[in-house]
Every structure is written in C-alpha cells, then in structure tokens.
Image (cartoon, rainbow, N blue to C red):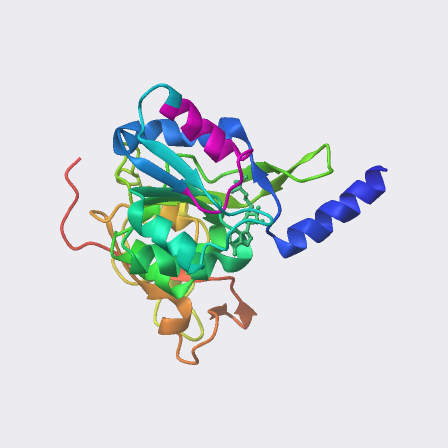
C-alpha cells in the first residue's frame, strides 16, 4: 500500500498539477494581506469549492471582510485561459491561487496582460522564467512572506502523506516583510569566489556569503531573490544573458546550476 502510494505520488508530482494547498498555509500567508482583500472580489481561478483558498475567502466573506470569492478552475472545471474565466479575471479585484505548475507561464502571462493584483504559489524555479524574472528584476513582483527554506507540504489525492515541494509565494501586493539589507561579512577571496570560465563575474554559491568588499558582478543562486533588497543590490540578468556562449556558467570546467547576475548598488545603504 505504502509502495503504491509512493508510486502514485511520484506520478502525480511528475505531472506537477494535482496537489492541494493546506488550509494552514493559505491562512498564514493570506492573513498578511487582509488590508488588500478588504471589500474586494477575490478570484481563485484554479480552485474548486473544497480548495483551502476558497474556504479561507468564504470565511472572510462570512465575516463581512471581502465582497465575494469566485472560483472556477480545478479538475473538470473551467480552464483559466477560457473566455469565460478571463471575463471573471477582468472583473475580479485580486487573483489568489496555487495554479498548475505545468501551466505557470501561461498563468503569469494572463496576470501580466490584465495587470491583476495577485498572490500565487509557484515553483522556486519559476523565478528563472523570462517574464517572471524580469518582473522580479524591476521590482514589480516579489516573494511573499513565508520563508523559502524547507519548501511547502501539499496534499496529494489518495495519499495519506503530504509531499514537500520547493514552492514559494509570489505577489505584487505590498507587505511588511520585504527583505531588509543583507548583513554581509565574508571577504573577497579569489579561491573561494572564482571567476567563471565563460563570463566576466565571480561565482558565489550562497547568498549569505556575498563578499562585503567586492563591487563587481557576481553570480548567485536563485534563492538570492528571497533576500533581494533593491536598495542594496541591482539584478543584472540571468546567467545565459551573461555567458559568452549563452549557456550555463562554468567554473574550471564544472557547470553551475542557474545563476542570477547581480552587483551592489552604487549608493551606500543607510543602516
Ligand atoms: C497545484 S493544483 C492546486 C489546486 C488548488 N488551487 C489548491 O491550491 O489546492 C492546480 C490545480 O489547477 C487545476 N488546473 C489544471 N489545469 C487547469 C486549467 N487549465 N485551468 C484551471 N485549472 C487548472 C488542476 O486540476 C489542479 O487542481
């Protein structure tokens, strides 16, 4: 039974779509944005009536805190790209959901096209998708309140265990937990932070190790975005835009997983 469950789980996660957000996770994130939801119509366009998102907003509605909650997606429901769903999207004030990861690009395209305020769950790697990355780079969207470490656990149908996924919240709603200036203490050391073979920048494997005394271009992991403070750093682009060969960065012949190129802002940060 356990083996069968693990197999089912792998198959479901391979498609990456049928896993459901736990109520406690929805509540602990959404509670930070209550002022943005006040008297608004919330659209959960990848959800059915029993989704934790719909339940959460139904509770706010019953308390007279939001105007309404609409839902239409989920298994057998309306496609979020259909004219019907797009009409609701246009009429709604805020979109809040966990969309299918396999359609995350299409999903974000719609939010961008219709300039919707939103709060959504995405895979950490979605940050490296071109349009999402550009919006993060220009500080038009940012991570939610929940920390990235440890991922999030989701309910998988027919399985008793929840499954951990490297999921994060992304939003364009202001909140009070944006990253402050990162305290840097590491010192530049060419052995520890080598130059890339194929780009004019140094490699930094951990955001917390960004050298305090280095003002040039640095390649950092995607998780840097969680700590990104636009007053402290400038995001220059994705690795492929910077490497001479248009590929992933490499150090002494070793390929390095996705990097974001950054440098410090020129102005000093007031403490
Ligand atoms: C990751 S699950 C999350 C479900 C729910 N939002 C939650 O958080 O519990 C994504 C959901 O999107 C639904 N879905 C897949 N393709 C869709 C589409 N084109 N339009 C709307 N929903 C879709 C799936 O059936 C699935 O239930």
Point out the image quarter for the C terminus: top left
Q: Identify the residue at horizontal 39%, vertical 49% (top origin).
A: 224
* Occupied quadrant, residue 128: bottom left
Whether residue 60 is situated above or below residue 260 in the rendered picture:
above
User: In the rendered view, would you say 77 is above or below 48?
Assistant: below
Can the viewer see residue 192 in this picture?
A: no
Quadrant, the N terminus:
top right
Observer-nearest residue: 162 or 75?
A: 75
Q: How many numbered discs?
A: 0
Residue 57: within the magenta? Answer: yes
Residue 253 appears at what percent x and percent y? Answer: 54, 73
Residue 186 at what x, y percent from top left?
36, 45
Q: Is residue 119 magenta?
A: no
Task: Return the residue nearer the eye: 266 or 82.
Answer: 82
Residue at 55%, 46% (x, y): give it: 74
Q: What residue appears at the point 55 percent right and 32 percent down from the top-left corner?
A: 22
Q: x, y percentage for residue 241?
A: 36, 72
Q: Position of residue 71 (x, y in %)?
A: 45, 41
Q: Residue at x 17, y 43 (%)?
A: 269
* Pick the front one: 50 or 105: 50
Horizontally, residue 12 falls left or right of residue 238, namely right
> Which span of residues is magenta-colored?
44-61
């Amino acid at each position: 039974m356990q083996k069968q469950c693990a197999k089912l789980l792998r198959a479901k996660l391979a498609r990456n779509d049928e896993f459901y957000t736990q109520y406690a996770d929805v509540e602990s994130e959404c509670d930070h944005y209550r002022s943005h939801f006040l008297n608004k119509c919330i659209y959960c366009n990848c959800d059915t009536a029993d989704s934790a998102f719909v339940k959460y907003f139904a509770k706010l509605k019953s308390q007279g805190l939001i105007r309404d909650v609409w839902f239409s997606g989920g298994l057998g429901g309306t496609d979020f790209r259909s004219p019907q769903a797009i009409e609701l999207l246009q009429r709604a004030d805020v979109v809040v959901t966990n969309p299918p990861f396999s359609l995350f690009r299409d999903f974000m395209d719609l939010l961008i096209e219709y300039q919707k305020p939103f709060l959504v769950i995405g895979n950490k790697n979605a940050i490296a998708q071109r349009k999402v990355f550009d919006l993060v780079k220009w500080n038009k969207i940012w991570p939610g309140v929940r920390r990235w470490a440890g991922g999030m656990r989701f309910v998988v149908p027919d399985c008793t265990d929840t499954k951990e996924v490297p999921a994060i919240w992304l939003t364009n709603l202001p909140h009070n937990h944006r990253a402050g200036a990162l305290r840097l203490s590491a010192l530049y050391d060419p052995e520890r932070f080598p130059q890339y073979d194929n780009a004019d920048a140094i490699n930094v494997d951990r955001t917390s190790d960004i050298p305090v005394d280095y003002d040039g271009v640095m390649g950092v992991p995607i998780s840097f975005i969680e700590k990104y403070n636009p007053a402290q750093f400038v995001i220059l682009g994705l690795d492929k835009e910077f490497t001479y060969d248009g590929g992933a960065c490499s150090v002494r012949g070793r390929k390095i997983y996705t990097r974001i190129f950054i440098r410090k802002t020129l102005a000093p940060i007031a403490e």
